Amino acid sequence: MSALPAGAATVPMWMVAELTYRCPLHCAFCSNPVDFAKVQNELTTAEWLRVLGEARALGAVQLGLTGGEPLSRPDLEQIVAEAHRLGFYTNLITSGVGLNQTRMRALKDAGLDHVQLSFQDSTRELNDFLSSTRTFELKRRVATLIKDHGFPMVMNCVIHRLNIDHVDKIIDLALEIGAEYLELANTQFYGWADLNRAQLLPTRQQLAHSEAVVSAYRLRIGNRLKILHVISDLYETRPKRCMNGWGTTFMVIAPDGLVMPCHAARMLPGLNLPSVRDASLRDIWLDSPAFNRFRGDQWMPEPCRSCPEKARDLGGCRCQAFLLTGDIGATDPVCDKSPQHATVLEIVNAPLAPKAAIERPLLFRTPENSRQLLADALPP
Amino acid sequence: MDNVAPLVRAAYPRIAPLYRFQWEAAQNAYVLLFPEGMVQLNVAAGEILRRCDGKRSADEIIADLRAQFQSDAIDDDVVAFLRSATGDGWVEWRDAVTP
């Protein structure tokens, strides 16, 4: 085995396969890259099957099948069957669109272990507005289908300014559809969510209220539903680790085969992400400059380098550092020791009149908007 | 809580359907897999859960472990682990009162 820098784990236990950027939903908080429309050359079925084998040989065991909408791939069942044969625990992360009785049965037969179903809100109006689709009733039917086939179900709802005051109703919905877990994932501001940050970032008061609601529900419902409440670290004074440590646990494979240390790494400049079309996953994980770039602590600038807490947060999130400071190697400015911490305070303390959130329209994640953003970014 | 132990020991524990238990060579450990999560088990936990197949009672599992580890002092540890695993939802029971 090649030598790894100190602090790096050797087993990428979690692999996320973004099978496609195609998606029937157009959610304004999507973490996909804003220029997804330029990605056309998706990996073939044969390429995905090879990649699964290589990942399993490296020790990957949890497999997230996502996108875009993974059901947009007609070979999803084949991919699940191979993953199951290899011993992966397979998680389908879906909007539910395209999940009919036939495909549900076929996925069960292929050995799928679990389905995570997204809702955008507890109400039809907001669910359909945020995703720019009419899908609320369909999602409820899909939830029944998932339970009828005996799958454990995680209901996922991305939380932001426009739905955070409905957290109680969202928990009620999860209880009603029989989910085992509810993921209340406060928006992480990458990709489309970053473009819409001003409209989506909740106020501190909203956040505190939602935390109190979740705590009260947890006491009342006990183990019937496990609520995972993920809160953006923008409100903290110490950053979160990037994916449990850059290149220690996770790898994400994009639809065109680029291998990334996290979902958002595609936008980081100068990383030169490796592709499964050019190298084996083993070589990529162990030896690629991109995966070694932020392993260990040799890369760290001050104030991280001499910080007694550096082993705890590992300098924080590289994507957040880039988006807020323009430097992918900077200390995550969430840390109040960062010289750029004021940029975070400005964001979270910015007063936003309720009307402003409505007057400025959300930019939905559509191929048309993606192409327009690409065109705007080109020099004239 | 001590008076619960005899009830546990006559019953048949098995891995709850929400979980998958398997050996992971890359981690040199047994693991429990569940939606988007994993618990890496230490040797003792792995050896106990490996035997929770719904066909052996807790008593039989303890006897088996005593023989394998050549120790008579493990009963309390096994019962305590099974209780905590039940509380975590990893293990469910057949044909008897649950702890």
Image (cartoon, rainbow, N blue to C red):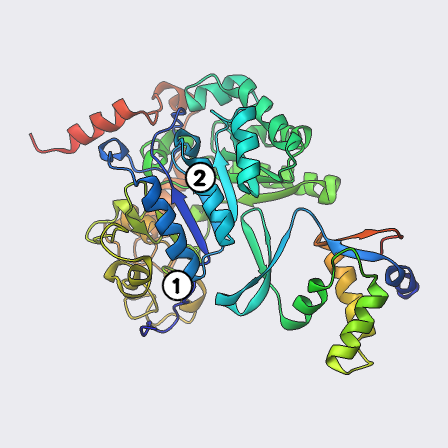
Q: Is residue B2 left or right of residue B41?
A: right
**Amino acid carrying mark 1 in the image:** Leu
Residue A96 vertical placement versus A338 (above, below): above
Labels 2, 1: front one:
2
Residue drawn at x 77%, y 62% is B82
Q: Where's residue B3, x and y in %?
A: 93, 64
Label 1 crowd (10 A; few <14 / some 14-19 / many >=20): many
**Residue A220 shows up from this direction:** yes
Q: Do labels 2 and 1 share a chain?
A: yes
Q: In this view, does A52 lie to the left or right of A3?
A: right
Tell me the element at label 1.
loop
Q: Nearer the viewer, residue A311 or B97?
A: B97
**Residue A187 shows up from this direction:** no
Q: Which residue lies under the disc numbered 1?
A: A314
Q: Which residue lies under the disc numbered 2?
A: A78
Residue drawn at x 64%, y 51% is B19
**Amino acid carrying mark 2 in the image:** Gln
Outermost residue toward the left in this view: A380
Residue B69 vertical placement versus B93 (above, below): below
Q: How far apart are marks 2 and 1 (CA)?
A: 38 Å
Residue drawn at x 53%, y 35% is A107
